[in-house]
Amino acid sequence: MADYLAFIQGIFQSFPTFFYLLLILAVSFAIYKVITAALRRALISKAKTKNQKNNALVFLSIWKYAFTIIIIIGLIFYLGGDIAGLGLWAGLMTAALGWALQKPITGIAGYLLVVIKKPFQIGDRIEIGAVKGDVIDITLTHICLREIGGTIATEEISGRVILLPNSILFEQNIINYTMMDEYILDQVVITVTYDSNLDKAIKICQDAIDKVTQDFGPGMPKPPYIRTYFQPSGIDVKTRYYVKASERIRVVSDLTQEIFRGINRAIDVEFAYPHTEVVLRKKMKKKAR
């Protein structure tokens, strides 16, 4: 009976500690919400460019994790009671993290890599390993991509969202389509026969790309141009141009149609394609000596 009474007394004695703990957590959560809302209004509303918006989102993400860490350290100190207790708790947490959370810790290092080195930002089109997509969010542990391709062999948006662990950044090559600017170099290639009028084929391709890109504005790093190369069955005519990564597939389709119509209208330009021709020639008799 005495043990039972002691147990009940211990519960009541510890109740104020748990009450204060819950109160601290509730107040901290309210403070976090108020400060976060104020920061979001102040930063996002004033961000005009893509870089400014990305920096604002990254700052808000860092603020969330920093506030959480501060609360955890404060609770450890509160429960430990002194600096020695804090050191003991910190040592135990470090050992636990090092043993059980190796991948998440590597992911946090990957997050710091993205924040400091900025190999890509929110809104960039990137390729990591075999995955391509537009970056829609960067968290402490994962990168969220709006997938391109995937379900089809092209670079159109598939409708799926991919979560990549940040730790993969140390294992795969990272290709950023839009790190320097929004334009990438692309091309449409046709092959014309050796009997074709090459100058006219070049003009058809140049007129087609000028028509398709006439609304691009002055943002292109370089005007469209044509390159030609010998092939076993004809001459490659390569129409090269700079295009926004998100518009690549549409422009390829429009340019293909324009070139096809132009070649069909020309009577002295023909497509070269794999086929077999049988040429019959009359055998000449050898002259008698």
Image (tube, grey):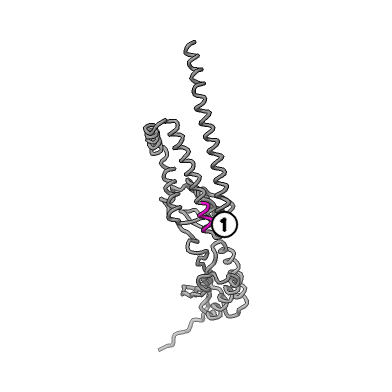
Q: How many marks?
A: 1
Depth order, front residue of 288/92: 92
Res 246 seen here: yes
Q: Residue furthest bottom?
A: 289
Q: Position of residue 139 (x, y in %)?
A: 50, 47
In the rendered image, the vertical position of residue 189 relative to residue 15, given as above or below: below
- Give the answer, above or below, for where 270 lies relative to 252: below
Quick check: is 31 in the magenta stretch?
A: no
Q: Which residue is mark 1?
A: 46
Left or right placement of residue 33 versus residue 130 in this view:
right
Which amino acid does the dot numbered 1 rest on? Lys
Q: Is residue 56 magenta?
A: yes
SS for tag 1? loop
x, y (%) of residue 238? 51, 72
**Split into 4 quadrants, where in the image is the C terminus?**
bottom left
**Coordinates of residue 154 in the picture (x, y in percent):** 55, 59
What main secondary structure does the magenta stretch of the protein show? helix
Residue 275 shows up from this direction: no
Q: Residue at x 39, y 37 (%)?
A: 94
Question: Which residue: 42% across, 30% down?
Answer: 81
Crowdedness near tag 1: few (<14), some (14–19) or many (≥20) residues, C-alpha within 10 Å: few
Outermost residue on the top side: it is 1
Which of the two residues, 188 or 58, is positioned nearer the viewer here? 58
Residue for point 46% across, 58% down: 175
Q: Nearer the viewer, residue 164 or 253?
A: 164
Q: Which residues are magenta?
A: 51-57
Against 130, residue 185 (above or below) is: below
Quadrant for residue 74, please give it.
top left
- Residue 225: x percent and y percent? 51, 74
